[in-house]
Image (spheres, grey):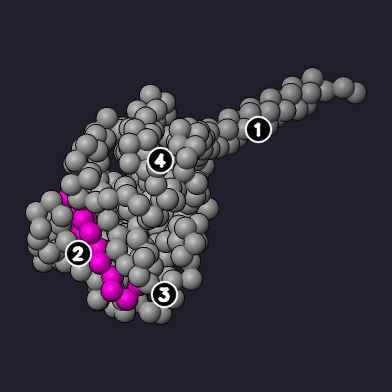
């Protein structure tokens, strides 16, 4: 005989089970959504804290900023390079948020910026760096990259410029450590992040290099561990922000010359590039107008590299 109470109990249990399944599904969706979007939830300063690292990813691509930068570079090329035998190259350094998973939005911004950057410089051979970099090549608390991790990147650039065989092996370098290092992103927080180290590559040909500030005539160290700004320890590379420097390497083949147009990221890779060049002239167009370039250098038969970070090209109004 059919029991109504038994049937009702079964219905109640079925409803309860269905409710539990729905709740579990909702929780799973919420967790999946949060995991997939945790890289795009910045604080009020635009900073993301993930996996022990700090990031300040670009919110969007500013195409007019990329255009402004490439127009300034075109003016420079037309004025000084077009009628010479110089070989011109360009490369864009990705923001470290490109390597933060999941980072599809950041990758899309960088890829489109790199396309605009290259298209705006058709006279320059493009060099792609994104595949030879990873998250571990950048400081945890700062946007900059680490010199001790840049040999593959330097090799990619030198190979593109036909000088790859002149970069010494990793074993040829020693290391000098500066610590503690608290990056610019960490300084926006209370100082609760573990300090990092800045590791400078030294030894071999680097010990024989000299650096001259062409705007003042003074000789400065390749790495100024004692005189760098304590509020900006990254400035120990090539003396920090300076308009125009010349690195001389007497061990490199005669005739090998490089002109490097750069931002602050260039300060830490220039010593590695100079292993292949008798002279590397390092120019920061934020502090030096194009119009006065002939006062410091002449263009004839050099390699010329435009090497800039995604961060600067997306906010380029400081380029002169």
Which numbered mark, 1 or 3, is in the foreground of this view? Answer: 3
**Quadrant (top left, top right, bottom left, bottom right) of the C terminus:** top left
Q: Position of residue 91 (x, y in %)?
A: 44, 47
- Residue 140 appears in the figure: no
In the image: residue 104, left or right of residue 71: right
Residue that sits furthest to the front in the current view: 83
Residue position marked by numbered label 1 in the rendering: 21
Quadrant in which the N terminus is drawn: top right
* Residue 199 or residue 112, whichever sits in front: 112
Residue at position x 28%, y 70% from top?
A: 249
Q: Is residue 151 left or right of residue 250?
A: right
Which residue sits at x=21%, y=56%? 245
Residue 117 placement: quadrant = top left
Instruction: Determine the secondary structure under disc 4.
Output: loop
**Where 189 falls versus 218 (above or below)?**
above
Q: CA distance from mark 4 to mark 2?
A: 28 Å
Q: Which residue is mark 3?
A: 168
Residue 203 percent across, percent down from the top left: 29, 78
Q: Marks 2 and 4: in contact by CB < 8 Å? A: no
Query: In the image, which residues are magenta?
Result: 233-252
Q: Residue at x 75, y 27 (%)?
A: 10
Q: Nearer the viewer, mark 2 or mark 1?
A: 2
Residue 7 versus residue 210 in the image, above or below: above
Which type of secondary structure does the marked residue at label 2 adopt?
strand
Residue wearing tag 4 = 82
Q: Secondary structure at mark 1?
A: helix
- The residues bearing labels 3 and 2 have C-alpha atoms spaced at a distance of 20 Å
> Which numbered disc covers residue 109?
none
Q: Which residue is mark 2?
A: 211
Neighbor class of circle 1 (other Cα within 10 Å; few <14, some 14-19, many 20+) is few
The answer to whether residue 125 is left or right of residue 22 is left
């Amino acid at each position: 005989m059919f029991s109504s109470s038994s049937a009702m109990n079964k219905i109640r249990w079925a409803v309860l089970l269905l409710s539990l399944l729905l709740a579990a599904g909702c929780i799973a969706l919420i967790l999946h959504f949060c995991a997939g979007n945790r890289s795009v939830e910045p604080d009020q300063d635009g900073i993301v804290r993930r996996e022990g690292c700090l990031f300040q990813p670009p919110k969007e691509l500013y195409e007019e900023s990329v255009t402004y930068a490439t127009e300034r570079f075109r003016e420079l090329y037309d004025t000084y390079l077009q009628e010479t035998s110089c070989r011109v190259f360009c490369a864009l350094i990705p923001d470290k948020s490109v390597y933060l998973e999941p980072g599809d939005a950041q990758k899309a911004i960088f890829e489109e910026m790199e396309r605009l950057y290259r298209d705006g410089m058709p006279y320059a051979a493009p060099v792609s760096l994104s595949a030879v970099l990873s998250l571990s090549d950048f400081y945890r608390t700062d946007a900059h990259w680490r010199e001790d991790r840049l040999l593959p990147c330097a090799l990619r650039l030198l190979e593109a410029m036909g000088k790859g065989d002149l970069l010494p092996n990793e074993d040829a370098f020693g290391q000098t450590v500066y610590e503690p290092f608290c990056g610019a992103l960490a300084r926006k927080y209370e100082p609760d992040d573990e300090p990092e180290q800045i590791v400078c590559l030294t030894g071999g040909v680097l010990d024989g290099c000299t650096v001259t500030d062409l705007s003042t005539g003074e000789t400065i160290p390749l790495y100024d561990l004692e005189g760098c700004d304590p509020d900006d320890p990254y400035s120990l590379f090539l003396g920090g922000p300076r308009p125009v420097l010349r690195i001389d390497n007497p061990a490199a083949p005669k005739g090998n010359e490089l002109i490097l147009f750069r931002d602050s990221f260039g300060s830490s890779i220039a010593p590695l590039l100079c292993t292949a060049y008798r002279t590397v002239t390092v120019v920061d167009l934020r502090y030096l107008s194009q119009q006065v370039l002939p006062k410091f250098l002449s263009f004839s038969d050099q390699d010329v590299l435009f090497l800039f970070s995604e961060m600067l090209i997306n906010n380029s109004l400081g380029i002169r």
